[in-house]
Amino acid sequence: MADLTVKYFSAALNRTVTFGMYIPDGASRPMKTLFLLHGYTMSGFNWLPAGVADKYGFAVVYPDAENSFWLDWASTGHKYCTFAGKELPDFVNRTFGLANDAADTYIMGFSMGGFGALHTAFTYPESFGKTAALSSALIVHEVAGMKPGSDNGHANYEYYREVFGEPSGVLAGSANPETLVDRLLAEGKRLPDIYMSCGTEDFLLENNREFHRFLESRGVPHVYRESPGVHDFTFWHRYAAEFAEAMFG
């Protein structure tokens, strides 16, 4: 196997960035590839359970997007969705000869990264054929209701305004995964295969149930799983392995 650290200049982020990549032994090119997105307050690392990529013969790419929610901000050098959804997959495939198209390129994340995995796949359906979202921070409705000076214990109003845009416009804007799904359906475009899970003791459970119900209301096929668990790696490792088997097995 090869466990690589790669640097290149990102036009989307306007700076040199570093990302990690794992390529198992014996897998032929082109090779199916999974992009792993990290959560809030964390950085990019290979959080897939050991041996899963080797078992199914796929490469893993794990970038770092800080506390960006994997969204394109208005300011220069902060186009994190463009970076994860278009620029980085193109660079990896062109440079290392991995997956050639969306049918062999998937994206998975937990918490903030779960939001990012859904949002990025809906923004760039031509890049990703499947998306898996674990305990996703689907908080756009809460952000839309925030007022100046407020703080939810994780971050303040100014942070959410910078990341998501003006709160009053969040629900109708491109930061909302629901809006992106409706756009794809209206345009008759293909949606990626969707896998979602959340623990029944997770503080984000109702947010995930709401999005599950939204997809059902639109007739969008998807897999949704709930089981006992909180917002931690015990739960994420379980479903990362389960969904990897469903996606790659």
Image: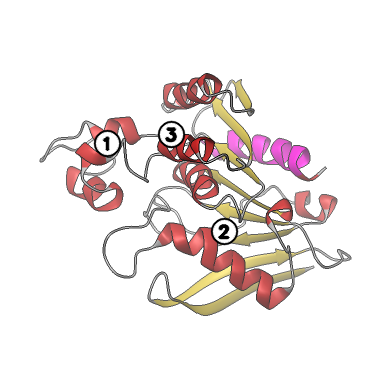
Q: Secondary structure at mark 3?
A: helix
Circle 1 is placed at which residue position?
A: 143
Question: Which of the image's four quarters has the N terminus?
Answer: bottom right
Numbered label attached to residue 178? 3
Q: 205 left or right of 153?
A: right
For label 2, the residue is 45
Q: Which residues are magenta?
A: 232-247
Of the residues under marks 1 and 3, which one precedes in the sequence?
1
Calculate the distance from the C-alpha at mark 1 to the C-alpha at mark 3: 14 Å
Question: Helix, strand or loop at disc 1?
Answer: helix
Quarter of the image where one finds residue 152: top left
Q: Is residue 25 above or below residue 121?
A: below
Furthest residue toward left: 149
Quadrant of the rendered image containing residue 98: bottom right
Q: Quadrant of the C terminus?
A: top right
Q: CA distance from mark 1 to mark 2?
A: 27 Å
Q: Main secondary structure of the magenta part?
A: helix
Of tags 2 and 3, the one toward the viewer is 3
In this rendering, would 27 be left or right of 240? Answer: right
